[in-house]
């Protein structure tokens, strides 16, 4: 069941882009683990890593080393596949976030679809994860009807895809995109699940998202790593942490 969310929203820092830079040369630097340690020092609550089928950035060695040394909870983003399930059950991250995966996409482009037997595969997957202490989250579009369909599967959290809101930010569609997030967050909470949000969030658009009721966690990658290139990891994480702390003052569930 969902917990009450008092105080600041939790911050997950996605370090995939550091691995992308490493893979560009096939060398050992920069090491995403180094980014994880700096993110922790700057106040991150969890490290997010997406191990893709094509291993274009993070890989199982990154995940294993994170589990061994990072001393922060790990949120493993992955597709629902037998190969990834094996990896998750072996490495036991605190959380798995299921995402759709398409080889041609640059990044995760939409929330999960529930057709094609997905829900039938999801339910036993979630119970195998729960048996070893892994909590499961679903990355979903802000669509209350889909959210209700997925919420009986045993997951404890739904992460709302904030990409459409981020693309609309500052334009005529921003208000509608935000309203869809608010409605969906209420639906998630009414189903007894935790509300998370992620994709396209930045220091500029985050404050509005923090008004989403019941929000307990945001996961941010691209904008943090992009700013870290110029200002350093600790400052890039710290400025987001500052926004979350400020918004958390006086927050009530
Ligand atoms: N949450 C999920 C489920 C994602 O797939 C991603 C992208 O990997 C993020 C959050 C972070 O998105 P961004 O890199 O745009 O901050």
Image (cartoon, helix red, strand yellow):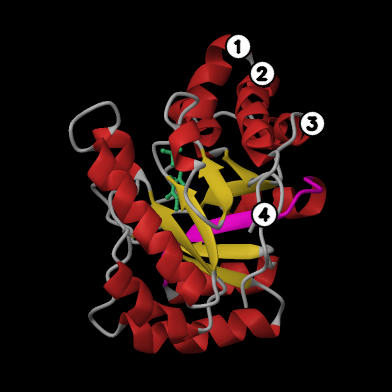
x%, y% of residue 57?
47, 41
Is ligand 1 closer than 8 angstroms to the Cβ of mark 4?
Answer: no
x%, y% of residue 21?
49, 27
Is ligand 1 closer than 8 angstroms to the Cβ of mark 1?
Answer: no
x 57%, y 73%: residue: 156
x%, y% of residue 131?
68, 85
Mark 3 vs 2: CB contact within 8 A: no
Residue 74 numbered tag: 4
Task: Report the span colored magenta.
Answer: 70-80
Mark 1 vs 2: CB contact within 8 A: yes
- Upstream in the sequence, badge 1 or badge 4? 4
For label 1, the residue is: 231
C-alpha span from label 1 to label 4? 25 Å
Is ligand 1 closer than 8 angstroms to the Cβ of mark 2?
Answer: no
C-alpha span from label 1 to label 3? 15 Å
Q: Is residue 50 left or right of residue 240?
A: left
């Amino acid at each position: 069941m969902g917990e009450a969310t008092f105080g600041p929203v939790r911050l997950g820092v996605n370090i995939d882009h550091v691995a992308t830079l490493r893979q560009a040369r096939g060398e050992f630097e920069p090491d995403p683990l180094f980014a994880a340690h700096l993110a922790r020092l700057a106040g991150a609550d969890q490290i997010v890593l997406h191990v893709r089928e094509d291993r274009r950035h993070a890989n199982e060695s990154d995940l294993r080393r994170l589990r061994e040394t990072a001393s922060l909870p790990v949120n493993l983003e992955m597709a629902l596949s037998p190969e990834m399930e094996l990896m998750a059950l072996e490495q036991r991250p605190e959380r798995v976030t299921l995402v759709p995966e398409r080889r041609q996409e640059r990044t995760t482009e939409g929330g999960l679809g529930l057709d094609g037997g997905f829900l039938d595969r999801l339910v036993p997957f979630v119970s195998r994860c729960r048996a070893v202490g892994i909590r499961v989250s679903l990355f979903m579009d802000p669509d209350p009807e889909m959210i209700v369909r997925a919420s009986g599967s045993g997951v404890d959290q739904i992460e709302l895809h904030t990409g459409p809101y981020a693309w609309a930010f500052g334009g005529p569609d921003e208000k509608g995109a935000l309203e869809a997030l608010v409605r969906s967050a209420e639906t998630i909470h009414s189903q007894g699940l935790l509300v998370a949000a992620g994709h396209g969030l930045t220091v500029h658009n985050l404050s509005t998202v923090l008004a989403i009721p019941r929000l307990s966690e945001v996961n941010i990658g691209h904008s943090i790593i992009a700013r870290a290139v110029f200002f350093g990891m600790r400052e890039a994480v710290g400025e987001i942490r500052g926004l979350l702390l400020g918004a958390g003052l006086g927050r009530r569930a």
